[in-house]
Amino acid sequence: MDKHTMHVLKDVSAHKEAIIQKVQQQIQEDPYPSKQLWPYRALAIMMTCSILLFIAWQASKPIDHLTTEILHEEEKQSFTDLFQTEVEGTETTFSQYFPIADQLHHRENIKFYAPLQGFEAMQAVAATMGDAVHLIDPETLPFKSNIQEVYAVTSDMQDGSLQKQFQFSFKQKSLTGVDRQYINFTVINVDHNPLVYYKVTDSQDFSGEITNIGLNFMNPLYFRAMTPDQGFAYVYYNFDAAGKRIYQMSTRANEFFTYYNGYVYQIGYQLNGDQQEAQEKMVALAREFIPHINSANAKK
C-alpha cells in the first residue's frame, strides 16, 4: 500500500472519529429522552450521521483522484514493455519514390519485433509516441478490417540515437491470407526534414504522377496514385508467424508521403470501389492521423 493510499485512510479515519464523538455528544445531552421526543431525537442523529459521512466522503475524493492518477502514470507502458519479442527480418521498408530525400534505406543495427495484435495494442503504442500520431478509429475506415496490428523496427541514427519505425496496419484478409484491402500508416522519427530541397519535378521522370495535395497551407502532403503498369512498387511489412519473421510485401498501391514535426509519414492503401471516393476519404484520414491540427488544438 503506497503512502498516498495510507493518507486517504488516515484522513477518513479522522472523519469517522469526529462522527462518533458528535453522536455521543448528542446522546449525552439528553440521556433519558421522553418517549414522545425519542423518534425525533433518533431521526436527528441519523441525519447528522448521514451529513457527516457525506462530508467525509467528499473530503477524501481529491486524494483518491490523486492516487488514481499516480497509479495510471505507473501503468503507462514504454516501448520495451510492449515490444519484447525480437524476430527475424532482412530489409526495412521506405518509400520507393523518395529514397534520395529521406535516406531511410540507409539504416544500421536493425532490429525487428513481432507485431502486436488488436486495436488496444495499437492504442498503447500510439500513447508512447505523444503527439506524433492521432490513431484512427477502425469504425471510421472505408472497409471492415479483420486484422489490426502494429509493427516495430528499430535502428541507429547517425548521432547514435534510436530510430523507431512503426507500421499501424488495418487489413481485410481472406481465408487464404491474402490482403484484399488495407491501409498502412507508417511513422518514423528522423533528425532532419528530408523534403527541404525536394521538388515534385525531381520524380516525374520515373515515378509517374505525384501531386502535392497539402497537409496544411505550409506543409506538403504528396500523393501518388496506384499505377499497375509502371513505376516503383509500394512495400510494407507482413508477418510469418510460423517462421517468426517479418518479410516485405511488394505490390501496387496508392501512397501518401510527408514530413512533419520530426517524423516522416508514409501511408499506403488499396481499397475496392470508386477510387476517387476512396482518395477523398483517405485524404481526410491522412490529415487526421498526422496531428498537425489535433495536437495544436489540444494544447489550447
Image: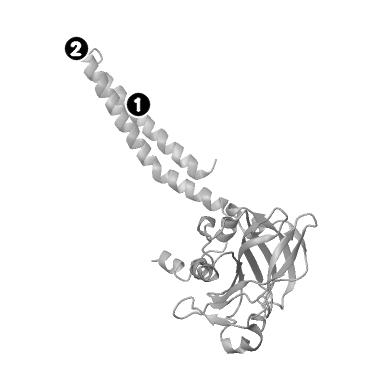
Residue 198 visible in rendering: no
Q: Which residue does the image show at 60% across and 73% down from the upper left?
A: 255
Q: Amino acid at mark 2?
A: Gln
Q: Find residue 36 and name its label.
A: 2
Front-lying residue, 218 or 279: 279
User: Closer to the observer: label 2 or label 1?
Assistant: 2
Tell me the CA gap for discs 2 and 1. Answer: 25 Å
Q: Which residue does the image show at 53% across and 43% down from the upper left?
A: 2
Q: Is residue 235 left or right of residue 27?
A: right
Secondary structure beneath label 2: loop
Q: Note whether 20 is above or below 62 in the view shown.
A: above
Tell me, yes or no, whether the two marked residues, 2 and 1, touch with CB atoms within 8 Å: no
Residue 152: percent from left, percent from top: 67, 63
List the residue tagged with mark 1: 20
Front-lying residue, 194 or 173: 173
Residue 292: percent from left, percent from top: 47, 71
- Position of the N terminus by quadrant: top right
Q: Amino acid at mark 1?
A: Ile
